[in-house]
Amino acid sequence: QVQFVESGGGLVQPGGSLRLSCAASGTIFFSTYAMGWYRQASGKPRELVAAITSVGTTNYADSVKGRFTISRDNAKNMVYLQMNGLKPEDTALYYCNFKVVRNQNYWGQGTQVTVSS
């Protein structure tokens, strides 16, 4: 089965930065899939914040555009999310998964990002 292990979250002050990592395993076709970073804040639905295609094309939610950067390393089956200029509203549990909904059969535990002074 596919597994995703997210890491890199933590407690940071507003304006700070974090780099999240996602390690994917259980598939030999990793490089062919579009990937995404999702987050779910307390009391709100899960949302896609950044996505990257198999060829490196990226898209971002308006709320994070200009602050977050998604990248991938296919040789290592890794996806990253560089987060700069963090705001309190970025506080959420962050997940990595395939972007195509029908492939989202497994979710990792996520990594918590808390932005607070």
Image (cartoon, rainbow, N blue to C red):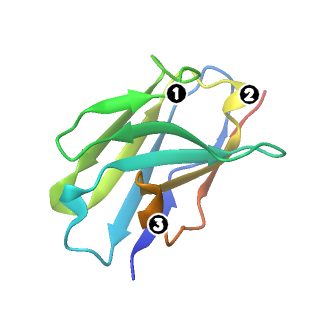
> The disc labelled 3 sits on which kind of residue?
Val
Q: Residue at x 58, y 49 (%)?
A: 9
Spatial separation of the CA atoms under disc 2 and disc 3? 24 Å
Q: Is residue 16 above or below residue 24?
A: above
Q: Residue at x 49, y 59 (%)?
A: 6
Q: Residue furthest front?
A: 102
Q: Which residue is mark 3?
A: 5
In-image side of 94 versus 37 (left or right): right
SS at circle 1: loop
SS at circle 2: helix
Q: Position of residue 29 (x, y in %)?
A: 20, 67
Q: Which residue is mark 1?
A: 61
Q: How many marks?
A: 3
- Which one is in front in this view, the residue at disc 1 or the one at disc 2? 1
> The disc labelled 2 sits on which kind of residue?
Pro
Q: Which residue is mark 2?
A: 88
In-image side of 88 versus 15 (left or right): right
Spatial separation of the CA atoms under disc 3 and disc 1? 22 Å
Spatial separation of the CA atoms under disc 1 and disc 2? 16 Å
Q: Position of residue 41 (x, y in %)?
A: 74, 43
Contact, CB < 8 Å: mark 3 with mark 1?
no
